[in-house]
Amino acid sequence: MLRLLYLLLFTLLTATVCAQQSLQTAAPYARQRMQGAIIAYQAMLETGSWNTFPDNTLLRQGDTTTYVTALQENLVLTGDLSLDAATLPGVYTSEMKKAVQKFQARHGLIADGVVGPNTVAAINVPLTQRLWQLKYNLANWDTAFFSVTQPYVVINLPDYTLQVVDSNKTVLQMRVIIGKPSLMTYPILSELDMLVLYPYWYIPKSIAVNEIVPLLRKNPGYLSKKKMVLEQQSPNGWIRVSPWQVDWQSINASNYTYRIYQLSGKDNELGQVKFLYPNRLPQYMHDTPNKELFTYPNRTFSHGCIRLEKPFELADYILEKGSGYTPQKVNDLWNRNTPNHYIKVKKPLPLRIVYFTAWVDALGQVQFRDDMYGLHRPPQLSAE
């Protein structure tokens, strides 16, 4: 009875917090909503009612076990399952499945309604750590958004998403692909000040030496097949050379005096547009011909640059909003098909590449994501 009272009180508190949050800004990472979530999770922690499960737990609709009752209690606490729907203790109902799917979506997991290893791992994160995440990310919010002006572009790396925010509303949203953990994409406060239509891809030396040169040792014709150009540095600048005239067996990082770039076209690794922003690293945003990779839930596939799911929509928005171009003028720019066409943005859009592993979205849903780069390591926390 006391446990049920705790659940009821927490549900009422959560409803009150959410109601207050609904009156606040709808921007995707609003400070007020994060503060409300901290209050809610502090209350959840004080109930001492969070259940954990063995790593090999597997639950799906139709199952009847004591673990289902424990799962129900957790889902009621988090607001994923309403008290009205928790009517059959120990039975994994269709309502339970919907609640699990909601929980999975809030944690960046595949929302299949089956409690398996990944879902169990998310459930078993201590409430002390979840509360720490919310507080830590709230502190990061102040750095990222304190003085930002709208419209702005925000990319949350752990969520693999880009959003364009204008008048406190998300006007464009898309998936992104980011750097591998060994070649991470770095958070930055910058601005989008340049676009390149139908870009050339100047291949970084590290990629050229480690990935392209081994292929050229087997077949120098690889470059022409990929519409790539080889140039060598000389006292008079870069001069074009034939890959067939180079002893690739002897080329390594120490004596590599070449550069390789890929001409614009449908197979260009940068796609048909790239977006530049001031930063100390050779990282930028771009289109990609490999659209199938956007279907993966975890998208750390690049060498550090950011690949965009909807690059043309973003380019059109920046050209119209940042440079005042009419839709017709934007369309004319695309139709010219000018290779490697640089366009300076007259009023650059603020860019925030952030690393939020916890936030509250515009619908009031508390979101958590994996710390795939290991940047948010909590201190040793006591058990709740």
Image (cartoon, helix red, strand yellow):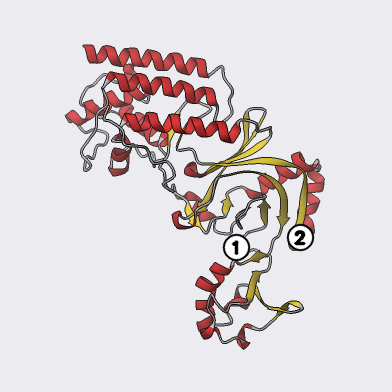
Judge left or right: residue 79 versus residue 227: left
The answer to whether the residue labelled 1 contacts the one labelled 2, judged by CB atoms less than 8 Å apart, is no
Q: Look at the picture and state if 341 lies above or below 133.
A: below
Give me the C-alpha separation between circle 1 and circle 2.
17 Å
Residue 381 percent across, percent down from the top left:
31, 33
Q: Mark 1 points at which residue?
A: 269
Viewer-closest of 295 and 79 = 79
> Looking at the image, can residue 215 be seen?
yes
Residue at 57% x, 34% y is: 143
Task: Pinpoint residue 148: horizontal percent, then vertical percent.
Answer: 65, 33
Q: Which of 262 and 66 is in front in this view?
A: 262
Give the quadrant of residue 322. top right
Q: Name the residue under label 2.
A: 337
Q: Residues within 10 Å of mark 1 (few under 14, many from 20)?
A: many
The residue type indicated by label 1 comes to Glu
Q: Is residue 224 above or below residue 123?
A: below
Classify the position of the N terminus by image quarter: top left
Q: Is mark 1 on a helix, strand or loop?
A: loop
The image quadrant where one finds the C terminus is top left
Q: Where is residue 294 in the image (x, y as percent from the top left)?
A: 51, 50
Q: Nearer the viewer, residue 141 or 25?
A: 141
Does residue 115 show up?
no
Q: Residue, x 67% and y 51% (percent of image)?
A: 275
The residue drawn where x is 48% and y is 26% is: 34
Task: Indicate left or right for 183 with 4 as reference.
Answer: right
Element type where label 2 sits in the image: loop
Q: Which amino acid does label 2 sit on?
A: Asn
